[in-house]
Image (cartoon, helix red, strand yellow):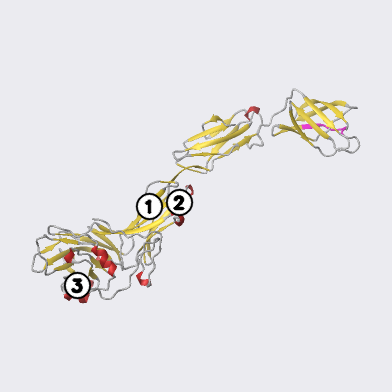
Amino acid sequence: MPRLRTLHRQRHWHSQSPLCQTPTSETGHLPPSRCEPALPLFPRTPSSARGAAMCLPQWLILLASFIPPALGSWGVTYPTSLQGIRGSCVVIPCTLSYPDDMAADDGIVAIWYKDYDNQKTLVYHSAAQEVDAGFRDRAQLLGDPAARNCTLLLRRLTLEDHGPYRFRFEIINGDRWSAERDVMLSVLDDLDRPSIAASEEQTEGQTSTLQCSTPYFCPLSDTALRWEGYDPQVSVVSGWVQLDTNGVSHHLTLTTSFSWKDHSKKLLCEVSYGSKKATSEVVLRVRHAPKDTQVSVSPSTQNIRVGDTVSLTCEVSSSYPRVSAYHWYKDRVAVGSEQILTLRGVRREDYGQYHCETKNDVGAGAAPAVVLYIFWRFQPSWVEVAINATIFGCEPHLKVLLSGVCCSRDPSAHRSISHASTNLLHTRNCWEVTNRGASYDNNSSEAFASQGENKIALGLALTFP
């Protein structure tokens, strides 16, 4: 049987009366409708039944008429089972059939029973028969038997309504037929959790569809179905109702897209009736390329000396699935394929820019480059030190040339350079001079530079501007 779909996409419906609202897109809410004037019953309904007609909205009767009729031989068709919640209502979709050559011009009597095989309680009778007091003013035939539709509405459900129901019809001045089986109605005091149907995994940036459903559907009560936790800016929520002889259910479809930041988050679907609520959840598994790839260095780049062991680790803040490949590059030349790149006994030649790339089944990520500085003890082939100074009051200027690499720094003022030593420290591929000074005799002398315990003699030349 085809499903009756009621779509409401990201919009709110409004009405002139608060009692006539139709579903909102976020909740799929189906609140009570305002009672209309007494409605004409379907053709060939015995006039004695008119006085018992209940106040029903026209759209509800139209809804029932969409249930396709059965054709051909004798028979009755309805769902195997249905569920309702105490205090709400339930719709039992039903079709009847009889041979095409059977005349029903005088009308068809529709009868619903509870526990047909035992107590045979009369739930509904269209020919003014006395129904059981427990169902009086609660049972209403929505369908038109002449149109082969026997759909029943049962209001204000009680726990005592739980049980089997069966339909029987009688063609006036003709034959009659009882259904061969029952439809089992379960009436619960508490709501069952809704069902969520969704893919096990979603992919970042792609459209995903998740469906939430509940067997509770009452067009006359405030039963509501609602999605929570999604981003409304990128989402569309649509609702529809299955109402046919295969079953009854209320569905709410969420069409959306996710980012990597949604990975491991939860989406909730809630069904509610009055103060009663039941919730189901789905944990998102969002497939995405490695994110925020970074390089960490141990020990830090300010404390690495020749001969040390250095570990460079390629890290990501998020990756699903897990990173499947790592690639390391030094000055754009491949140097490794593990998450951790280990340099043992580092040399001056290990100085350079390092970066890593990560890959998984979805995509790749790349880390910004880091510069690895190597501090080493100097063994220059020659050193030339030139000191420019003015004897009377000018600040000296010390210039160091080391194997063709030049670094310079203006020292603090010294009026005398006769008692001092010169310390050289390597910083960023050049030599920085601190605590500078030298002893001299006339225009030439011997000075020294030191690093730790190592010292080297420096040729010294003095010039005066």
Q: CA distance from mark 1 to mark 3?
A: 44 Å
Q: CA distance from mark 3 to mark 2?
A: 52 Å
| Boundaries of the magenta span | 417-423
Place of residue 208 in the rendered image (x, y in percent of width and height, measured from the top left): 40, 49
Between residues 41 and 311, which one lies in front from this camera angle?
Answer: 41
Q: CA distance from mark 1 to mark 2?
A: 14 Å
Residue linked to disc 1: 210
Place of residue 281 in the rendered image (x, y in percent of width and height, measured from the top left): 40, 54
Place of residue 19 in the rendered image (x, y in percent of width and height, measured from the top left): 36, 72
Disc number lying in front (1 or 3) = 1
Left or right, 189 with reference to 256: left
Judge the density around disc 2: few (<14), some (14-19), many (≥20) Cα neighbours within 10 Å: some
Q: Quadrant of the N terminus?
A: bottom left
Q: Which tag, 1 or 3, sits closer to the chain's start?
A: 3
Disc number lying in front (1 or 2) = 1
Residue at screen point 32% across, 59% down = 240
User: Quarter of the image holding residue 139?
Assistant: bottom left
Left or right, 81 with reference to 369: left
